[in-house]
């Protein structure tokens, strides 16, 4: 009964703290819309500068084969129909190199004089191959990707024009649903986990304000035990976490995202991860005595969870432990990291609960560990008479 009474109390207090609650619920959906807008506004194509020295001597127009190659680059498309390259013809080589170094362009391709003539004799015995010169910046990943894709188009184009049979044929068998996946689609699982991480603030607020306002003494006099207090807070925060996750998921659906997996599996893993975040909040609250400390020192655990849980960008995998066919990595010590992996399997590859059993089990084990340490420290620091 004491736990139920405190559950009602902390739920109503969360409603009164509407600013913190609104931030926790709205932050992730707003971030989903912002990232969707960013990916829509950002050009998906590689900016390809072309210095074409292959011209017909009489008219000065581009040679037949170089014109055909330029056309092939312009017509190259991603699976969603968007162009792979934005072609800009350049006559000033030095100015083009400056653009590549400044990352205003991804790659400079130089088509030499006599390119058309080289293609015409390419199938002859002992003929010298036609040559393209790439000017790339090895410090820019987009430059390397643009070079790989432009080379592929060039090889295919030249093989088609000359009738030369390539020595290797690649066949592709689709193992997915056949639906093309955008960069935004790949980012959605991490954005959903971000909604859960935001519960760190609402959970910590529910605990720290009791210490800050001195009401923890009254709770001790009411004989409310630490496990009862934390159970009430946990139930309340898990409900908020599911709501935050649902709002972020609806925002993603509103942006055209479509899941391959089960919504029930998503909610189960999300609820377990929310409980893990609450456990971390309990651990952090044991070292905080005021709301001011929560808003300053308390932001560090949030950024640790956000960056090292791979919610912002993937991190190098540092293997720590092998369990059967599964590997436990260094940053898997954070429950949201396993959640990102599980969400990716569920949403992108259509996995069910059985397929994410390792990740779900890891989340629950970590949650128990964090709760055990957090409960002991919180009781020792804030509930000793």
Image: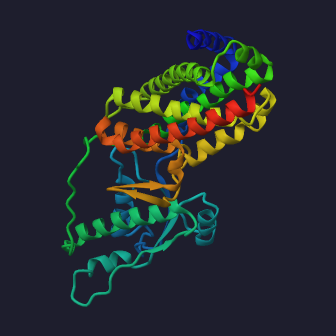
Residue 89 visible in the picture? no
Foreground: 308 or 133?
A: 308
Q: How is the image coloured?
A: rainbow
Q: Position of residue 115 (x, y in %)?
A: 37, 76
- Residue beneath the point at 51% across and 63% down: 143
Instruction: Answer left or right for 192 relative to 150.
Output: right
Q: Is residue 159 above or below residue 2?
A: below
Q: Quadrant of the N terminus?
A: top right
Q: Quadrant of the C terminus?
A: top right
Foreground: 356 or 375?
A: 375
Count of numbered circles in the view: 0
Write down the quadrant of residue 220 in the picture: top right
Q: Position of residue 110 (x, y in %)?
A: 48, 72
Q: Residue lying furthest bottom in this view?
A: 126
- Residue beneath the point at 35% across and 26% down: 264
- Residue beneath the point at 43% across and 78% down: 113
Instruction: Answer left or right for 90 relative to 206.
Output: left
Instruction: Answer left or right for 122 relative to 286.
Output: left
Q: Is residue 211 above or below residue 358?
A: above
Foreground: 184 or 167?
A: 184
Q: Position of residue 225 (x, y in %)?
A: 63, 21
Instruction: Answer left or right for 54 relative to 103.
Output: left
Q: Position of residue 317 (x, y in %)?
A: 48, 58
Residue 213 visible in the picture? yes
Q: Is residue 177 above or below residue 90?
A: above
């Amino acid at each position: 009964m004491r736990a139920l009474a405190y559950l009602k109390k902390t739920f109503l207090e969360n409603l009164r703290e509407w600013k913190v609650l609104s931030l926790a619920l709205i932050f992730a959906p707003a971030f989903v819309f912002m990232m969707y807008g960013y990916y829509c506004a950002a050009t998906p194509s590689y900016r390809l500068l072309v210095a074409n020295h292959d011209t017909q001597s009489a008219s000065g127009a581009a040679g037949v084969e170089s014109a055909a190659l330029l056309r092939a680059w312009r017509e190259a498309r991603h699976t969603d129909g968007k162009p792979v390259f934005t072609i800009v013809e350049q006559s000033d080589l030095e100015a083009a190199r400056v653009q590549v170094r400044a990352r205003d362009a991804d790659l400079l391709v130089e088509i030499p004089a006599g390119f058309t003539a080289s293609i015409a004799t390419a199938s002859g015995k002992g003929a010298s191959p036609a040559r393209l010169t790439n000017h790339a910046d090895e410090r820019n990943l987009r430059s390397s990707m643009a070079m790989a894709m432009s080379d592929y188009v060039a090889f295919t184009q030249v093989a088609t024009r000359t009738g030369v049979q390539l020595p290797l044929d690649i066949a592709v068998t689709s193992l997915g649903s056949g639906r093309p996946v955008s960069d935004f689609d790949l980012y959605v699982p991490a954005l959903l986990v971000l909604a859960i991480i935001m519960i760190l603030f609402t959970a910590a607020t529910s605990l720290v304000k009791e210490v800050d306002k001195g009401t923890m003494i009254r709770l001790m006099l009411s004989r409310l035990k630490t496990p009862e207090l934390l159970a009430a807070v946990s139930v309340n925060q898990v409900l908020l976490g599911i709501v935050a996750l649902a709002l972020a998921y609806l925002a993603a659906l509103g942006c055209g995202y479509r899941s391959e997996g089960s919504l029930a599996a998503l909610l189960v893993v999300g609820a377990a991860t929310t409980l893990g975040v609450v456990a971390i909040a309990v651990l952090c609250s044991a070292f905080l005595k005021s709301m001011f400390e929560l808003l300053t020192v308390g932001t560090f655990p949030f950024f640790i969870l956000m960056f090292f849980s791979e919610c912002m960008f993937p991190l190098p995998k540092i293997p720590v432990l092998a369990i059967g066919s599964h590997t436990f990595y260094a940053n898997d010590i954070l429950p949201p990291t396993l959640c990102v992996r599980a969400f990716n399997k569920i949403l992108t590859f259509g996995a069910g609960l059985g397929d994410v059993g390792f990740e779900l089990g890891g989340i629950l084990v970590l949650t128990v560990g964090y709760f055990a340490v957090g409960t002991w420290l919180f009781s020792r620091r804030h509930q000793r008479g």
